[in-house]
Amino acid sequence: PALALFPFPVLSLHGRVGLLQPFFGSTSHISDRFFLGGPEPLRGFAGAGVGPRSSARPAGGPSSGDALGGNVKCSGAAIVSLPIRWPKALEETGLRATFTLSGGTVEARDPLTCIHDGWVGAGPRAQDSPGSGVAGSMRNLMRGAATVGIAIPLQGMHLEICASSILASQPHDRPHIW
């Protein structure tokens, strides 16, 4: 198995940034927008559990609380994976302990407005907290989680069993609860 090939600690760093800029004065379509949450990009949150949500239901619009997605996305994670060497019998199984810190945000704002105005002001129908300048806004809008787990090597892949704790969230975010 792939993880068994690394009998030493492994550090992985992951990052993603996305900007969606509609042209000709149009708005972005929900199927083109970025969503965040779930097991891969931001653990501890439900799929599409982070970011702008609908508030009041306009005629023919989405239900209250539905994920709307965003035009700006950033996420990142640092993962440390360590071989389990005690007791001795477990060393040969290839089991690994994993520790993950992940964070990110999704914004409804127009990317050009974000760059020009310093990320201040919420997009239409979005329930994101406004900030004060770039640093204040990003600090207010970032979400984060810490995860610990066990990686079990299988044929050409691994199964990871983990538990997450949300470190930072917004009131309208949806945590992943089992």
Image (cartoon, rainbow, N blue to C red):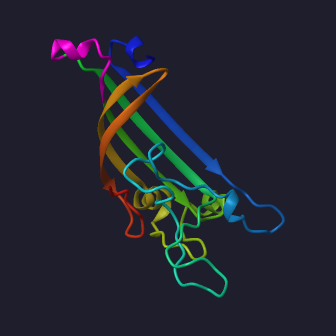
Identify the residue shown where x is 50% and y is 57%: 134
Residue 141 rendering spot, x and y as whole percentages? 44, 60
Task: Determine if the magenta segment contains residue 88.
Answer: yes
Name the residue furthest right: 24
Task: Determine if the magenta segment contains residue 69.
Answer: no
Which of 104 and 82 lies nearest the eye of the viewer? 82
Residue 81 rendering spot, x and y as whole percentages? 34, 25
Residue 16 rendering spot, x and y as whole percentages? 56, 41
Magenta extent = 86-97
Q: Is residue 74 left or right of residue 151?
A: right
Identify the residue shown where x is 55% and y is 78%: 63
Which of 170 and 112 lies nearest the eye of the viewer? 170
Identify the residue shown where x is 15% and y is 17%: 87
Residue 14 rendering spot, x and y as whole percentages? 49, 34
Q: In the rendered image, which quarter contains the C terminus?
A: bottom left
Q: In the rendered image, which quarter contains the N terminus?
A: top left
Name the residue furthest front: 155
Q: Is residue 86 above or below residue 55?
A: above
Q: Is residue 108 above or below residue 18?
A: below
Query: Number of numbered discs present?
Result: 0
In which quadrant of the rendered view does residue 135 lie?
bottom left
Q: Is residue 45 left or right of residue 19?
A: left
